[in-house]
Image (cartoon, grey):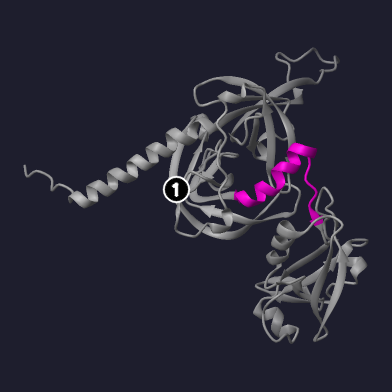
Amino acid sequence: APSPTPLPEAVLQQTLAEDQLLIYLYERISPSVVSIQTTRSSSGGFIHPPLPQGIPTPQLPFRESGEGSGFVIDTQGHIVTNHHVVADTSELLVTFYEGTSVPATVVGSDPDSDLAVIKVDVPPESLRPVVWGDSDLVKVGQRAIAIGNPFGYENTLTTGIISGLSRSLPASTGYRIPEIIQTDTAINPGNSGGPLLNIQGEVIGINTAIVPNINLLGERSFLGIGFAVPSNMARRVVPELIARGVYDHPWLGFWGTDVVPQIAAAMNLPEARGALVIEVVPNSPAASAGLRGGTREIEVFGRPVTIGGDVIIGIDDTTVRRFDDILVYLSRKGSVGQQVTLTIIRDGQTQTLSATLAKRPPQALPRD
């Protein structure tokens, strides 16, 4: 049989160099990554066999286990993970790269960014903190690396690329998390809370969610679309979680949507840009500022949309081209008690309103 054609020397050397880089990064970063086993206690357990008829069945507590990932950020024992990994847990067990397992406690948690900080009590010299990267420098197409605990398989490395930027995801509170990073790096259940890394080994995101492929047995697997909270958001939120246990998100208080061409045409707007105010939350900063919601409905892509309200085209010195631009501005530059200037279009005229940002309510208020 003919022998296989050898790889050209240049290709072989490049491949070997890439292999060595991944091996180096894995060996360098893995000691910073932990697996997290969680226990949640609930009532409503069953007694087998059932008690005789007429004897009330007591509600026994039962324990539900889960798993996730996290990474060390300092030598004081603080570990970053996802809020949804540690929410409502009664016990946390952290396992390090070399196999050591220690209990952990929740220091702070923020459902609106799906971030949490837990803490372990171990000698400082045994901890290997990660290096934060700048998520603002992330580009679509660049390499991405994840290390975590998918399906309980500890210290798993997967690679891919950055597939998209500026996505938004719904948080458990009903609000949206802006500036989410999309990747095709394999992220599966158990990866949640682990780091997304660039080729320099810097943390550029915290893996948080996947678009699951659910088989006939109800089992979830990776479909090629994963999401991560950007590192720069974590670098704003995490210090507050360590210091206070919570993070106060600034809030305006209105429901809105992007101004698409159909809306622009129906409202006689010069172009399809800005955030249309659909409805204003009563007694909110937006209401106090005088922001107005819509007055009539049209159909856009088969769905009713209330139009006729103010169109926000700027907040302070930032241009608003879509609704998410407001979320990004508030996330990056807003703070509770801060006064912001909204530039709006109302009845064809441009004007400004002043609003004082308030603390976001725990849950997004449902529309009537």
7 displayed left or right of 293:
left
Residue labelled with disc 1: 199
Is residue 230 visible in the rendered structure shown here? Answer: no
Range covered by the magenta-colored residues:
229-250
On the question of residue 141 being in view, the answer is yes
Q: Is residue 259 left or right of residue 134?
A: right
Q: Please provide percent x and percent y for residue 264.
A: 70, 82
239 magenta-colored: yes
Q: Name the spot of residue 359 as percent of width and height, x first.
A: 85, 53
Query: Outermost residue, left direction?
Result: 1
Measuring from the top left, give residue 331's x and y in whole percent: 72, 57
- When asked about the image quadrant of residue 296, the answer is bottom right
Rendered position, 122 above or below 368: above
- Secondary structure beneath dot 1 equals loop
Question: What type is the residue that disc 1 sits on?
Answer: Ile
User: Residue visible at 23% across and 47% down?
Assistant: 12
Magenta-colored segment: predominant secondary structure: helix
